[in-house]
Amino acid sequence: MNNPPDISQDPSEHEEYAHNVQKHVKGYLVVGGLLLAFTAITVALSYVDFGTRKANIGVAMLVATLKAGLVAAIFMHLAAEKRLIYRVLIFTGLFVLGLFWLTFLAWYNPIVR
């Protein structure tokens, strides 16, 4: 018969785990600060005219991509994942770009023009 686990274990066994959590919390706070800074940059850039509406949207998408990359890398833990996750992520990105390309072709319809 198995013995139940001992609940009164030495707390020093978990010291490394607690230290590791503090390291992650600091990283989360830094990324949270960066996200707030990028949000402020987004708001500031919304008042700048880059010449055309497409240029304005392009700059906004660039800042949004940086923010999404931070969220994916840190909060979704992609920075510490294995190769399989990156392969799936790259395939998904290529699939989305393909869908964007199809939308672009349907929108501008280069065959008729």
Image (cartoon, grey):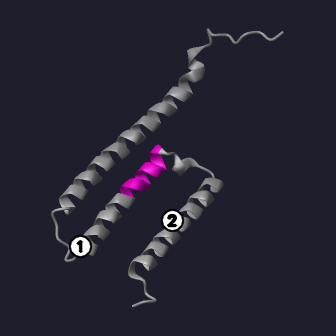
Q: Nearer the viewer, residue 90 or 100?
A: 100
Q: Residues within 10 Å of mark 1 (few under 14, many from 20)?
A: few
Identify which amino acid the numbered label 2 is placed on: Val
Q: Quadrant of residue 106?
A: bottom left
Residue 19: x and y in percent read 49, 30
Residue at 80%, 11% (x, y): give it.
Answer: 2
Q: Nearer the viewer, residue 72 or 13?
A: 72
Q: Secondary structure at mark 2?
A: helix
Q: Residues within 10 Å of mark 2 (few under 14, many from 20)?
A: few
Q: Which region of the structure is painted magenta?
A: 66-75
Earlier in the chain: of badge 2 and badge 1, it is 1
Residue at 42%, 89% (x, y): give it.
Answer: 112
Q: Is residue 69 left or right of residue 98?
A: left
Q: Is residue 107 left or right of residue 44?
A: right
Q: Is residue 83 left or right of residue 49?
A: right
Identify which amino acid the numbered label 1 is placed on: Arg
Q: CA distance from mark 2 to mark 1?
A: 23 Å
The residue pinned by badge 1 equals 53
Q: The C terminus lies in which quarter of the figure?
A: bottom left
Residue 69 is covered by the magenta coloring: yes
Q: Secondary structure at mark 1?
A: helix
Q: Main secondary structure of the magenta part?
A: helix
